[in-house]
Image (tube, coloured by chain):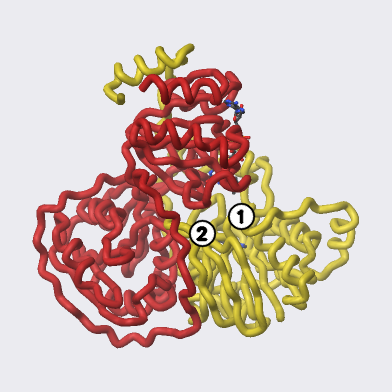
Chain colours: A red, B yellow
C-alpha cells in the first residue's frame, strides 16, 4: 500500500488552498496520507492541514531556517522524511515546481511534473507541449516524486481531525541561499487559482489605465482577474496575473478572454475552464475556436456595456 | 567568471503539435525546430552580463543528436565563446541531463549555470533545480532580474504571490522566466562569426555519467477537444446565453 507524504505550502500561518487539491490527487492514489509542514512555527498551519479529509497524520518540522520557503533549505529535510514514504507529492505551484526537483535529485529518482490524472500508484497522465499532447507515464522503481496540476483536481473537504506530531530531522541545511523579500500583490479580488469566475484582458487593453474596464467588470460579477503574457510584458498588470503555459493554469466555471487572440500558450492555461467567453474585434481570432460563447466587437464598447447590464 | 548556458533543441513554439495516430508520440520529423525560448532568454542574459563585465566566458551546452549543432551555432551567434555538444541521441530526461550538466559544471569550474525554467516540449521544469541539488549549490528559479556581484547574485523571482528576491552565493544555478529580458535578433555577421567558434563533442561516458532510470511513456494522446461554441451578436444575447447556462 502507498504511503504518501504531501508537502504543505503556506505563508503567514495560512495553509495554501493548493494543498487540498494535492490531497485529492493523493486520495486517487490511495493509501496512508501524511502532510508535512516545514515552518519556523508550524502549529497554526498544521491545525488547518489536520482538518482536511483523508489526512491520517500531520508532521511538523519546526526550524527557524524554515521561516521562508527556500527550496535549498527545505529539500534536504524533505528528502530525509521521504525515506518512510512511497510517494512525495507537491502542489503544482511555483513553490512546488521550485522544490520538487531538488528533492527528486536528492533521492536520485525521476520526477513526474503536473500530474493531471492518476491511473495507479505508478501510472499518471501529464501534459506536454503546452497541453497539446497528454502522455501517460510509468514511474521507475524508487520513491515517486510528483507535482500535482491543480486545475485537474477538486479540493477535498475539511471535516477531518488528524493527529499532529512534531518531528525533528537531522539533515544539515545550507546557508548559501538567503531570502531577502517578497513583494506580494495584495488584492481584495478572488484568488485567480481558486476563483469560480475569471476575467482576463490582453494586449488590446493598451495600458494599465485602460485595464480598469476589466477590473470594473470583474468586480461587478465577483471574478478574479487574469491577463495574457502580452498584457503582463507590456506592464499593464503584474506578473502574478499571467494565465497560460508559463503562468497560472486555471479551471474556473466561467472564463472571459477579452482582447486576447488565443495563442496556444494562453489556451494551455484555460483548457479546463467550464465555459469560455471570448470578446474580440477580429472574427478570425483563434480564441473563437475554443470559446463556448463568442462576441465580435470592440471591447471598449462591449465590456462597459456588460458591466452596466449584469 | 565563467558561465554555462544550457540550450535545448525543441519543436518551434509556433508549430501546431500533431499527436501520432498510434499514440506513440508527437510528430517531430519534418517539423521546424529551434532553441527553447527560455534558453534564448538564458543566452541573452549571459551575453548581457558579459557586456556588463560580470562574466568573462560563456560556454553553451546541449545534449542531443547531430542536429543540436544548429542550436549550438545559434548560441554562438548570440555570443557564447565556445560550445560543448554532449552527443547522445534518443530521449534524455531531466535527471540524466542534470547529471551531465553537473559534471560539466564541475569540470569547467563554472560559477553560474543559466538554464531555461522549462523546455517547451516536455514542460518538465526540473533540470536546473536538479543540477543545483546534485551539486549542493544554490538555485534561483524563474528569474526576472539577475544582479551578479562577485561571489554572489541577487535574483528576483516570479512566484505565484508576486516577486521574491533571493541572495545566493556562487556557484549557483539560475533558471530564466519570460520577463528577464527580450532576446536579440541574430544578425548575419554574428551568424557567420559563430561558424568559426569551437564546438567540443563529448559523450555521457566521457563525463562519467550513466543515464538514470526515467519515466516510461506508455501512451501519448491529443487532449480532449472542446465542442464548437455559439456566436452572439449583442451584450444582451451574451447575458441571456450565460443566464441560460446558469452562469449568471
Ligand atoms: C515560451 C512561451 C511561453 C508563453 N507563455 C504564455 C503564457 O503563459 N500566457 C500567455 O498568455 N501567453 C504566453 N505566451 C505568448 C503567446 O504566444 C502570445 O504572444 C500572447 O498570449 C498574446 O497575448 P494577447 O492575446 O494579449 O495579444 P495579441 O496576440 O496581440 O492579441 C490581441 C487581441 O486583441 C484583439 N483586439 C485588439 N483590439 C481590440 C479591441 N478594441 N476590442 C476587442 N479586441 C481587440 C485583437 O484582435 C487580438 O486578437 C508565451 C510565448 C512563448 C514563446
Ligand atoms: N537535452 C538538453 N539539452 C540542453 N539543455 C537542456 C536539455 N534538457 C534540459 N535542458 C535545459 O534545462 C531546462 C529545463 O528543461 P526541463 O527540465 O526539461 O523543462 C531547459 O530550458 C534547458 O536549458
Residue at position x 14%, y 59% from top?
Answer: A51
For residue A80, above or below residue A185: below
Image quarter (top left, top right, bottom left or bottom right) of the C terminus of chain A:
top left
* Ligand 1's quadrant: top right
A222 left or right of A232 in image: left
Residue at position x 59%, y 73% from top?
Answer: B101
A65 left or right of B30 in image: left
For residue B182, above or below residue B88: above
| Residue closest to the eye, B198 or B207 | B198
Q: Give the image quarter of residue B14.
A: top right
Q: In the rendered structure, are the residues bearing label 2 and label 1 in contact, judged by CB atoms less than 8 Å apart?
A: yes
Which residue corresponds to mark 2? B158
Question: Pointer 1: residues within 10 angstroms few (<14), some, or many (20+)?
Answer: some
Which residue corresponds to mark 1? B179
What chain is tagged by disc 2?
A: B
Residue at position x 30%, y 24% from top?
Answer: B248
Question: Pointer 2: residues within 10 angstroms few (<14), some, or many (20+)?
Answer: many
| Residue closest to the eye, A282 or B188 | A282
Total labels: the figure holds: 2
Residue B242 picture location, percent across and down: 34, 20
Residue A105 picture location, percent across and down: 43, 72
What chain is tagged by disc 1?
A: B
Q: Which mark is residue A297?
A: none
Co-location on one chain, circles 2 and 1 = yes
Q: Is mark 1 within 8 Å of ligand 1?
A: no
Residue at position x 43%, y 22% from top?
Answer: A306
Tell me if I can see residue B12 in this picture: yes
Image quarter (top left, top right, bottom left or bottom right) of the N terminus of chain A:
bottom left
Q: Secondary structure at mark 2?
A: strand
N-terminal-most mark, 2 or 1: 2
Amino acid at each position: 500500500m502507498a504511503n504518501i507524504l504531501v508537502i504543505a505550502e503556506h505563508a503567514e500561518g495560512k495553509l495554501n488552498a493548493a494543498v487540498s487539491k494535492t490531497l485529492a490527487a493523493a486520495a486517487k492514489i490511495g493509501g496512508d496520507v501524511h502532510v508535512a509542514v516545514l515552518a519556523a512555527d508550524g502549529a497554526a498551519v498544521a491545525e488547518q492541514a489536520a482538518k482536511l479529509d483523508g489526512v491520517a497524520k500531520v508532521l511538523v518540522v519546526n526550524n527557524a531556517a524554515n521561516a521562508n520557503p527556500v527550496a535549498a533549505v527545505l529539500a534536504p529535510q524533505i528528502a530525509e522524511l521521504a525515506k518512510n514514504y512511497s510517494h512525495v507529492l507537491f502542489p503544482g505551484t511555483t513553490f512546488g515546481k521550485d522544490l520538487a526537483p531538488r528533492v527528486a535529485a536528492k533521492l536520485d529518482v525521476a520526477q513526474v511534473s503536473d500530474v493531471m490524472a492518476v491511473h495507479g500508484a505508478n501510472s499518471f497522465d501529464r501534459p506536454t507541449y503546452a497541453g497539446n499532447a497528454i502522455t501517460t507515464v510509468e514511474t521507475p522503481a524508487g520513491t515517486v516524486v510528483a507535482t500535482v496540476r491543480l486545475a485537474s483536481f477538486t479540493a477535498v473537504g475539511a471535516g477531518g481531525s488528524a493527529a499532529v506530531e512534531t518531528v525533528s530531522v537531522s539533515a544539515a541545511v545550507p546557508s548559501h541561499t538567503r531570502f531577502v523579500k517578497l513583494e506580494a500583490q495584495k488584492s481584495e479580488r478572488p484568488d485567480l487559482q481558486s476563483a469560480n469566475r475569471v476575467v482576463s484582458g490582453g494586449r488590446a487593453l493598451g495600458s494599465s489605465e485602460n485595464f480598469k474596464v476589466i477590473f470594473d467588470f470583474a468586480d461587478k460579477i465577483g471574478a478574479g482577474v487574469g491577463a495574457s503574457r502580452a498584457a503582463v510584458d507590456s506592464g499593464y498588470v503584474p506578473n502574478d496575473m499571467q494565465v497560460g503555459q508559463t503562468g497560472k493554469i486555471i479551471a474556473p466555471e466561467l472564463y472571459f478572454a477579452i482582447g486576447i487572440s488565443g495563442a496556444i500558450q494562453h489556451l494551455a492555461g484555460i483548457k479546463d475552464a467550464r465555459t469560455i467567453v471570448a470578446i474580440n474585434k477580429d472574427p478570425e481570432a483563434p480564441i473563437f475556436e475554443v470559446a463556448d460563447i463568442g462576441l465580435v466587437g470592440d471591447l471598449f464598447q462591449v465590456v462597459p456595456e456588460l458591466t452596466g447590464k449584469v | 567568471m565563467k558561465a554555462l548556458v544550457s540550450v535545448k533543441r525543441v519543436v518551434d513554439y509556433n508549430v501546431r503539435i500533431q499527436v501520432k495516430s498510434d499514440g506513440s508520440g508527437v510528430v517531430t520529423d519534418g517539423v521546424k525546430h529551434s532553441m527553447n525560448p527560455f534558453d534564448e532568454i538564458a543566452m541573452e542574459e549571459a551575453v548581457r552580463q558579459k557586456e556588463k563585465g560580470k562574466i568573462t566566458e560563456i560556454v553553451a551546452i546541449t545534449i542531443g543528436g547531430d542536429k543540436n549543432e544548429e542550436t549550438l551555432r545559434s548560441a554562438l551567434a548570440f555570443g557564447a565563446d565556445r560550445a560543448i555538444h554532449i552527443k547522445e541521441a534518443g530521449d534524455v530526461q531531466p535527471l540524466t541531463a542534470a547529471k551531465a550538466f553537473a559534471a560539466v559544471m564541475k569540470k569547467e569550474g563554472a560559477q553560474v549555470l543559466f538554464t531555461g525554467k522549462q523546455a517547451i516540449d516536455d514542460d518538465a521544469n526540473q533540470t536546473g533545480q536538479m543540477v543545483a541539488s546534485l551539486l549542493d549549490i544554490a538555485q534561483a528559479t524563474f528569474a526576472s532580474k539577475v544582479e551578479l556581484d562577485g561571489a554572489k547574485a541577487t535574483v528576483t523571482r516570479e512566484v505565484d504571490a508576486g516577486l521574491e528576491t533571493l541572495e545566493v552565493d556562487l556557484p549557483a544555478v539560475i533558471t530564466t522566466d519570460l520577463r528577464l529580458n527580450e532576446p536579440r535578433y541574430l544578425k548575419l555577421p554574428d551568424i557567420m562569426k559563430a561558424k568559426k567558434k569551437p564546438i567540443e563533442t563529448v559523450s555521457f561516458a566521457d563525463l562519467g555519467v550513466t543515464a538514470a532510470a526515467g519515466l516510461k511513456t506508455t501512451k501519448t494522446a491529443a487532449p480532449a477537444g472542446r465542442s464548437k461554441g455559439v456566436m452572439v451578436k449583442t451584450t444582451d444575447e451574451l447575458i441571456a446565453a450565460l443566464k441560460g447556462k446558469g452562469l449568471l
